Image (cartoon, grey):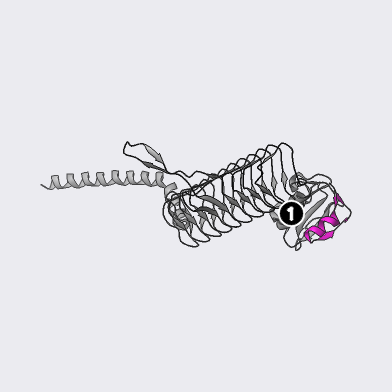
Amino acid sequence: MEFTAAQIADVVKGEVVGDSNAIINDVCKIEEGKPNAITFMANQKYEEYLYNTSASVVIVNKDFNPEKELSPSLTLIKVENAYMALSQLLQAYDNQTKKEPGIEKLAYIHESAKIGVGAYIASHVYIDKSAIIGENVTIFSGAYIGEGVEVGSNTTIQSGVRIYRNCKIGKNCIIHANSVIGADGFGFTPNSENNYQKVPQIGNVIVEDNVEIGALTSVDRATMGSTIIRKGVKLDNLIQIAHNVEIGENTVIAAQTGIAGSTKVGKDCMIGGQVGIVGHLKIGDRVKIAAQSGVGSNVLDDEIVQGSPAFGIGDYKRSYVGFRKLPQLMERIDELEKEIQLLKQLSSNGETENH
């Protein structure tokens, strides 16, 4: 597909500086610019690339004024926020590439399932009985939609996703390839023979509106009640959310994080990669947890923590400075011990001579 600079400016509500008829058919990074491609510059540290890029159009912030002469073939589109404008543009492009509504012939849909208007169901999708698929839902090949599952309108289910029975997915969600929603929680209890007896997991998972779940992420069903992912949450790839966990609105969690059962995470939190959070905790609102932290106790609203076990980031940084100096400190302690020992020997020899 091709667009003119003027058409793009209409989408992002920007002002064209240069050739409004410049043709665009690709997107690129500013340092890898090529003709007929559009890129953006939201950070001034990339300005040097602007003067040499081969891209035809660059989206910039409206207050940007070049310090050097630009190429005559380069057109700028000035906007309030270049990064947000690029996001809008990519979204518009993505909407243009959506699948046409329809059900491919190799899809299986149980006769009791309901499929909304405008849905696209690919071949080799399995939709079990009593499932409800909303309007304009897209489900790609190899996905499994279990009994009684509900999927809200405008949601996209990528290839290989498994959504187990009775789980509910909201509107405008994206679930990426091979993620599992509603697998059994890790519930076992030791019996008299010291074996582990499985505890049936009879709850479900509720994913609210505008949630995105990355590839190969697992959200376990509740033992009883619901595991809940509140609206606006963004989960990266390779995340484990255990049974009865609740993730608050607009919280973002990076890859390889694991959250144990029944922990409640507040809203507007930011959790880095490879974080481990033990079960039955309360993580407050607007909390930030640095990557590779291990959280073993409750965290209050607005705290920033780091380390394993995690504690306040200011104390952590000061402690880390001391930790890095530990080899030198140990050497100094060894030297001091030798000096003390020498002083003791001298003192002892002096007392002997006096006697």
Give whichever of 149, 141 is nearer the camera.
149
Name the residue furthest front. 111
Where residue 330 sits in the image (x, y, percent)?
Answer: 36, 45
**Relative to 154, 68 lies left or right:** right
Q: Amino acid at mark 1?
A: Leu
Where residue 59 sits in the image (x, y, percent)?
Answer: 77, 55
Where residue 307 sits in the image (x, y, percent)?
Answer: 45, 50
Residue occupying image coordinates x 48% and y 62%: 301
Which residue does the numbered mark 1 point to in the structure image?
86
Q: Which residues are magenta?
A: 3-23
**Relative to 183, 197 lies left or right:** left
Name the residue furthest left. 355
Report whether residue 69 is seen.
no
Report whether residue 189 is seen.
yes
Does the magenta portion include 22?
yes
The image shows a total of numbered marks equal to 1
Local secondary structure at mark 1: helix
Give whichever of 284, 279 is nearer the camera.
279
Where residue 25 sits in the image (x, y, percent)?
Answer: 83, 46
Does the magenta portion include 201?
no
How packed mark 1 is, by other alpha carbons closer than 10 Å (few <14, some 14-19, many 20 or more), is many
Instruction: Identify whether 86 is placed above or below 301.
Output: above
